[in-house]
Each structure stands twice: as structure tokens, then as C-alpha cells.
């Protein structure tokens, strides 16, 4: 029998990636491709990047394999019914028909396979539940802390998407008196204060001279007091959001990935301190752990939309 593979696509605020993924959640060597996205990219640029990585990935199909579907994880918000996306950090895509665009690329390649779109937080949560840090746990939130902050939910062993596909979008819950940037018209949203760029933005207002999350991580490691305050502030904000989600959903585990989540292991300590101080014992029980999947998690999750479709509503 031919080996069934999925074209996995992960679209985010700085890049789009695609790769072939097998039924064990493994990326096929040589099939992973990446192109830029970003706040300044126009529709033709974005289409060129998305179409390019999908075509390059299809071209890497090994002998003895067949494509059984396409899974797309995209930064939110989305409309899972109509296949539309409006990623907040890519302002030139608003209600863009990403599912239909990729379906067209697939058809142009002579293929007739299903195309599934979900929010990237749903995809990463499914990846952690499948082959990552949340294996065997049926009440889970997956999170990504990077250019933006996304999330997804599995409750009672089933993926929760909501009618529009945006359930679990924890980056846009409000976290009280910690105030961030007004990028989204709501400086109280978690993403406005705790994403990588917004953490750096706060630090720069306090006198930090670096410009990237990597700069901030290096300064933190060197003992810079502003960098340490920035990481502590972000960890507290994320911890508050996790505490609220756990109070609502009785979560057992939260698995966190994304580039900025690797800034320092101390970031997790700050989150856990918030949880440990909570007044409800059932909130204090939630475990917060790093993703076990490194940078491959979003692609594995996109493939899970096809390989593990039985978990979706």
C-alpha cells in the first residue's frame, strides 16, 4: 500500500511553512519549505509565498507515497465554515479565502484531495495531544507565544473549535491591570502585552535598546534589570490568562511553544508562580509545560487535521 502523507501548511505572522507529514507525525526529510509573510506583505506577495511552499512540498513527494489531504493551521481569527482568514499580524488579509486558494494550487497540480483549515492554536494542540507533551491527557490547552499568541483546546478528549473556529483564542482574553500596546484597539488583551514583539516594545519604553526577542533573551541572561522585568511581566500576564482558562474549563495541562516561549526557562517559572498562588485548588493542579515538538509542532498539528480528523467536530 502507498504511504499516506499530508501536505501540512502553517501560516503565521512572519512566515508560512509547508511539509509532508506521515501517519506517525513525522516530517518527511527534504519536504519542508518556508517563505516570508509579515505586516507589510500585500496579497500578491502572500499568495506567492503560500503557493510557493505548497508547490515545493508537493514536488518533494517520495516514490511509493500518496497525498491524502491538506491541513492548514492559520493564525486567527478565521471562519472555518467559509474557509476565510484574517490573521491579525498580517493586515492585508481580511476575510481572505485561504482554503480555496490552496485548493486551487492543489487542483493545478492535478490532485483531488480534501483541504482542511483550522486556527493554528487548534493545530498545535492536536499535535501536542498526538505526539507531544500532552499525550494521554484529555483536558488540554496548547499555546503559541511568538509574533502573536494563539491557543487551542481539547476538552474531554475532543477538539473544541466553536462554530467559527476561534475557540481557544487565548491571545485575546483580557488580563486585568497589566496594560500593553494598543495594536488591536484593546491594550488589555494578552497578546498586546505578552507576545514577543509587544514584550520588547514594553522593554524599550523602559530604556532597553535591543529590538528583537533574541536581544531581550540575551539581555535577560546577562542580568539586565529591564529585560528581567519584561520577562516577569509577560510571565505573570500569561499565568493569569491560563488561570482564567483553567477556572473555566478545569484544564489538566497547558503545553506552550513558539519562538518567544524559548526566551528563558524562567518565563515558565513566572507563569507557574501565578498558578501556585491561585485560591482554587483545582486551578493550582494545572501543569504548564514547554512544547515537546520544537519548531515542527505547528506542521505536525496541521497534518493532524487530516490524520486525526476524528477528533474534530
Image (cartoon, rainbow, N blue to C red):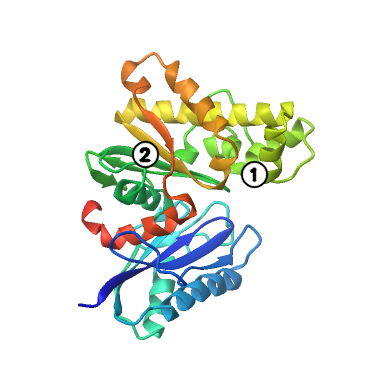
| Residue at point 47%, 50% (across, down) | 294
The residue that label 1 is drawn on is 197
Residue 202 visible in this rendered orientation of the protein: yes
| Residue at point 59%, 38% (across, down) | 192
Direction top: furthest residue: 279
Q: Is residue 194 above or below residue 120?
A: above
- Residue 178: which quarter of the image? top right
Residue 113 image position (x, y, % from top left): 29, 75
Q: Secondary structure at mark 2?
A: strand
Of 164 and 155, which appears nearest the observer? 155
| Residue at point 35%, 25% (across, down) | 247
**Residue 1, which numbered label?**
none
Residue 122 image position (x, y, % from top left): 37, 49
**Crowding near the residue tagged with mark 2, few <14, some 14–19, many ≥20 C-alpha atoms within 10 Å:** many
Q: Secondary structure at mark 1?
A: helix
Residue 97 visible in this rendered orientation of the protein: no
Residue 81 image position (x, y, % from top left): 32, 59
The residue that label 2 is drawn on is 141
Q: Mark 2 or mark 1, which is nearer the start of the sequence? A: 2
- Residue 66: which quarter of the image? bottom left
Amino acid at each position: 500500500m502507498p504511504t499516506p502523507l499530508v501536505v501540512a501548511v502553517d501560516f503565521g505572522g512572519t512566515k508560512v511553512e509547508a511539509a509532508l507529514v506521515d501517519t506517525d507525525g513525522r516530517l518527511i526529510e527534504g519536504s519542508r519549505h518556508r517563505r516570508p509573510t509579515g505586516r507589510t506583505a500585500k496579497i500578491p506577495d502572500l499568495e506567492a509565498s503560500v503557493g510557493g511552499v505548497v508547490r515545493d512540498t508537493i514536488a518533494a513527494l517520495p516514490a511509493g507515497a500518496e497525498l491524502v489531504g491538506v491541513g492548514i493551521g492559520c493564525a486567527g481569527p478565521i471562519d472555518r465554515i467559509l474557509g476565510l482568514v484574517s490573521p491579525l499580524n498580517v493586515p492585508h488579509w481580511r476575510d481572505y479565502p485561504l482554503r480555496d486558494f490552496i485548493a486551487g494550487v492543489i487542483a493545478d497540480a492535478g490532485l483531488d484531495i480534501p483541504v482542511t483549515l483550522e486556527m493554528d492554536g487548534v493545530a498545535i494542540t492536536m499535535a501536542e495531544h498526538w505526539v507531544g507533551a500532552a499525550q494521554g491527557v484529555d483536558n488540554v490547552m496548547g499555546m503559541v507565544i511568538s509574533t502573536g499568541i494563539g491557543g487551542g483546546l481539547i476538552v474531554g478528549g475532543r477538539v473544541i473549535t466553536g462554530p467559527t473556529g476561534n475557540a481557544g483564542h487565548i491571545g485575546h482574553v483580557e488580563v486585568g491591570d497589566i496594560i500593553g500596546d494598543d495594536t488591536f484597539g484593546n491594550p488589555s488583551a494578552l497578546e498586546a502585552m505578552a507576545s514577543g514583539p509587544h514584550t520588547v516594545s514594553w522593554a524599550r519604553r523602559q530604556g532597553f535598546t535591543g529590538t528583537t526577542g533574541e536581544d531581550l533573551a540575551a539581555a535577560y541572561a546577562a542580568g539586565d534589570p529591564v529585560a528581567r522585568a519584561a520577562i516577569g511581566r509577560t510571565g505573570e500576564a500569561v499565568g493569569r490568562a491560563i488561570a482564567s482558562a483553567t477556572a473555566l474549563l478545569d484544564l489538566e495541562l497547558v503545553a506552550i511553544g513558539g519562538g518567544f516561549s524559548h526566551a528563558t526557562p524562567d518565563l515558565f517559572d513566572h507563569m507557574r508562580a501565578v498558578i501556585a498562588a491561585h485560591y482554587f485548588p483545582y486551578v493550582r493542579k494545572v501543569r504548564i509545560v514547554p512544547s515537546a515538538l520544537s519548531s515542527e509542532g505547528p506542521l505536525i498539528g496541521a497534518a493532524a487535521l487530516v490524520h486525526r480528523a476524528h477528533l474534530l467536530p
